[in-house]
Amino acid sequence: MASPKEIDISLPKFEFEQNLELVPILRKLGINSLFDHTANLSGFSTETSLMFGDAKHVAKIKVDEEGSTAAAATVVFSFRSARPAEPTKFECNHPFMFLIYDNTAKAVLFTGIYRDPKTQK
């Protein structure tokens, strides 16, 4: 395994949000009763005619001078004062793919692609 080394990273500031309608996906997986009157949600409420009307997933990420924030997950870029003479430089001045990985859960929490901000919608 390679030893960690310091890298000087230049990132553009960006922020975006993605919304995903889950009802069609859940229905394709066979989860239909949650969205009609046959739903059994007795573990949530004593109301007998309770059902879900909609389900959405929203993911948001923001990268600025303070670091990165992705929904409830936060990544902070820290800089030590005692830097090596010549750290490796990585300038993200072109489209790139990114991911946020949780070491504890050993899972990728977020992925995305950064494009030119003028074309990003």
Image: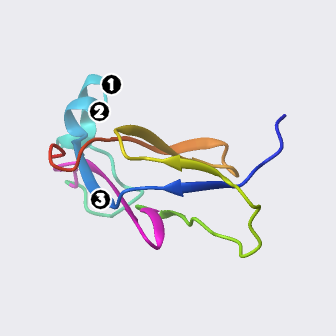
Q: Are there few (<14), some (14-19), or many (20+) residues within 10 Å of tag 3?
A: some
Q: Which residue is mark 3?
A: 15
Q: Are marks 2 and 1 in contact (CB under 8 Å)?
A: yes
Q: Which residues are magenta?
A: 50-69
Quarter of image, res 80: bottom right
Q: Helix, strand, or loop for circle 3?
A: strand
The percent position of residue 119, horizontal first and vertical second, equals: 15, 43
**Image spot of residue 62 (x, y percent):** 36, 62
Quickly name the residue at label 2. 26
Residue type, mark 3 in image: Glu
Label 2 CA crowd tier, 10 Å (few <14, some 14–19, many 20+)? some
* Quadrant housing residue 82: bottom right
Is 5 positioned to the left or the right of 109 in the image? right
Instruction: Give amino acid for label 2.
Output: Leu
Q: Which label sits on residue 77?
A: none
Q: CA distance from mark 2 to mark 1?
A: 5 Å
User: Which is nearer the eye, 75 or 92?
Assistant: 92
Q: Amino acid at mark 1?
A: Leu
Q: Is residue 11 magenta?
A: no
Residue under label 1: 29
Quadrant placement of the N terminus:
top right
Q: Main secondary structure of the magenta part?
A: strand
**Furthest-front residue in view?**
85
Q: Is residue 39 depicted above or below 84 in this figure? A: above
Mark 3 and mark 2 residues within 8 Å of each other at the beta carbon? no
**Which of marks 2 and 3 precedes in the sequence?**
3
Q: Residue at x 26, y 23 (%)?
A: 28
In front of the other: 102 or 67? 67
How far separated are the C-alphas under marks 3 and 2?
28 Å
